Image: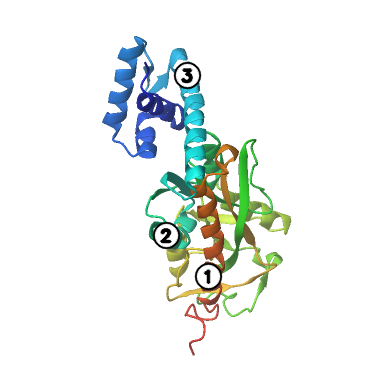
Amino acid sequence: MLDLSRLRALHAVSVHGSVGAAAVALGYTPSAVSQQIAKLERETRTTLLERQGRGVALTEEARHLADTAQELLSIMERAETTLEERRGRPGGRLTIGAFASAARGLLPGVLAELAHRHPALDARMTEVDPHLSVDLVARGVLDLAVAHDWDIAPLPAPEDVEQAVIGDDLCDLLVPERHPLAARKSVHRQDLSGQRWICQPPGTVCHDWLVRTLRAAGCEPDLVHRAEENHTQIALVAAGLGVAMIPRLGRGPLPPGVHAVPLDPVPVRRLYALWRTGAARRPAITETVRTLREHWPHVQGETTGSVDHRAGEPAGRP
């Protein structure tokens, strides 16, 4: 009889594309994943992985087994959901994916509350790019994801994945303290022509939003520095190297030398929770989504009132 944990390891390699990435997703070491697949090869008397350059590729037989593993994991999920639903309280392991600023600004409080209220629930978070998380939920790699979209790029809605709105995250223009726009109470998008921009790398939702939005306003952005982390972008702004469009969630207090100037209209990205339809009745899912939505007004209040755009200091201070 085939071992489910070994099939799970093969399925993870199929989804993530490498043994190393599968190990990260499963919480194992790469050698442990390799050992599981080696045992599965001996059980099936079949070669499952082949060397391809510096990595590995699944054989045709391995892809068939990975599809079978997907079906078995779905059956297991339905059984676990039914049992948890009958118990009537959250329990078991819940894998959560969240993009960086949500992982920093929203999830800590949510996870702490879940751990306090539901000690039988083993919630585990992984930082995941939002454009990847929807597919990872659909494939069963993640139980729940916190993702976001912008007006120009609505979140995809694949079959068998449900979603709920958590809330709207506002975005500000960050400029160096001596920048001509620093004294403005607000800035229109048409006023941004000729700026040197600090932004996320191409292919990210935030990068695409910035480029397409400025072009629609008649401004061709000059992208001089690219950094994935918002805090890195803020540090570059503080050094006087350009301006940046940074969401408020997870941003924290701005350092000296950086001013937040509101844009008119204000850019907004919307946060969602996503889960598979087959797990919708699971108490762990419903309770986590409820807690995310319950925490959002408090988080939003902190991000709205934490920074005075005139001086980069906590609002309310003289």
Taking 4 as reference, is 139 left or right? right
Q: Earlier in the sequence, mark 2 or mark 1?
A: 2
SS type, badge 3: helix
Question: Where does label 3 land, which residue?
Answer: 63
Question: Where does label 1 land, which residue?
Answer: 298
Assess disc 1: are there few (<14), some (14-19) or many (≥20) residues with their C-alpha within 10 Å of its C-alpha: few
Residue 87 lies, with reference to residue 219, above or below; the image says: above
Any part of residue 38 in sight: yes
Labelled disc at residue 117 = 2
Amino acid of disc 2: Arg
Front-most of 116 and 133? 116
- Image point 28% across, 30% down: which residue? 32
Q: Earlier in the sequence, mark 3 or mark 1?
A: 3
Amino acid of disc 3: Arg
Q: Earlier in the sequence, mark 2 or mark 3?
A: 3
Any part of residue 243 in sight: no
- Image point 62% across, 48% down: which residue? 163
Taking 308 as reference, is 256 left or right? left
